[in-house]
Image (cartoon, helix red, strand yellow):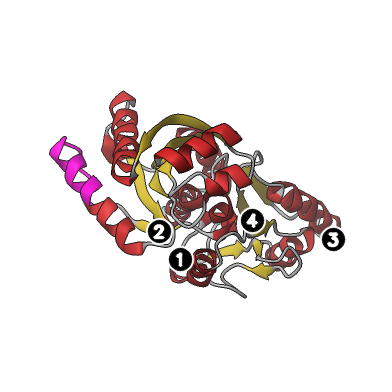
Amino acid sequence: MREAFHIISDGSCDLPTELVREKNVTVVPFYVSFDDTHYMKENVEIDIRDFYQQMVDRKGVYPKSSMPSIHDYEEVFLPFAEDGMPVICICITTKFSGSMQSALNARELVLEKYPQAQITVIDSTIDTVLQGQYVLEAVALRDSGASYEDAVARLEEIKSTGRIFFTVGNMEYLKHGGRVGKVAAVAGSVLDIRPIITLKQGEIFPSGIDRGRKRTTQKALELLLEYLKESRLGSECFSISVGYGYDREEGIAFRDHALAVLREKGHAIEEIPTYQIGATIGVHTGPYPLGFGVIEKAIH
């Protein structure tokens, strides 16, 4: 059966390549560079494992990411325009990247050639594994038989419910990227103080600091529990995932602990998918980001 629309996302969604293929989603990759000269397409010319390995092995080298170009998006949009297939393109929050602007410019170029083309570009207001969950909610709408217009409307409705609660290994990369003041970064290195951070409505906000990994990851879990408690919906109406960086084993252990605590507190959650955070966000957090993404399900 022919789909009612096709889903495209920029590479910030951090969904595994095999899952993207299985769900028939097209990803437009970001680029990453370790020398500020040679940029490689993420998951095409450099995989995430190699990216993190280089970060760990090359201390003091701060990689950079670069957004997809207008041409990258145009190349992806054109075949669907030619085929008459409507497209929903989901982009990282505009507060972090110009990726959406590239997509909008490409859309205008495609419409010049194919005026009847239907291309909706959405500012997800989120990023990384949470954006991945949002993309999968778009997939759920598509696969349920939702129309193009209804799917766009529902995706716009739920995006404001998205939250990321996370911590990092240290403040080094946040400091380098200008995300925290130098004083806080020095205090962090001396006292092992690490931040707990919330992302909502496209921006990051400090949600506290604490010493050591165990305490900061516990605070991220507490923020998730508080969010679910305050919601007018039951926890079964939310999609929750765990995002990790270099250390997959830590990510799995964190996920298992969270599942046990959530069930203990009466939340009927069957599973929490665990995904590796990609280079788009990893260049800012360093190799050890860890936390939760949560967003309302499109269908419940």
In the rendered image, the vertical position of residue 50 relative to residue 177, given as above or below: below
The mark that comes first in sequence, 3 or 2, is 3
The boundaries of the magenta stretch are 257-271
The mark that comes first in sequence, 1 or 2, is 1
Tell me where residue 125 appears, x and y as whole percent: 57, 39
Q: Mark 4 points at which residue?
A: 86
In the rendered image, the vertical position of residue 254 relative to residue 19, given as above or below: above
Query: Dot 2, crowdedness within 10 Å: few (<14), some or many (≥20)?
Result: many
Query: Dot 1, crowdedness within 10 Å: few (<14), some or many (≥20)?
Result: some
Label 4, label 2: how many angstroms apart (C-alpha)? 28 Å
Tell me where residue 88 appears, x and y as whole percent: 61, 52
All told, the count of numbered labels is: 4
Are the two marked residues, 3 and 4, in contact with CB atoms closer than 8 angstroms? no
Instruction: Indicate the amino acid at tag 3.
Output: Lys
Q: Name the residue under label 2.
A: 275
Q: Name the residue under label 1.
A: 16
Quarter of the figure with residue 6: bottom right
Are the two marked residues, 1 and 3, in contact with CB atoms closer than 8 angstroms? no
Query: Dot 4, crowdedness within 10 Å: few (<14), some or many (≥20)?
Result: many
Q: Residue 113 carries which label?
A: 3
Q: Looking at the picture, tell me which residue is in the foreground, 293 or 250.
A: 250
Dot 2: what SS?
A: strand
Query: Dot 3, crowdedness within 10 Å: few (<14), some or many (≥20)?
Result: few
* Outermost residue to the front: 190
Would you say 103 lies left or right of 280 here? right
Q: Looking at the picture, tell me which residue is in the foreground, 212 or 202.
A: 212
Residue 261 covered by magenta stretch: yes
Instruction: Indicate the amino acid at tag 4.
Output: Pro
Tell me where residue 286 appears, x and y as whole percent: 51, 54
In front: mark 4 or mark 2? 2
The mark that comes first in sequence, 3 or 4, is 4
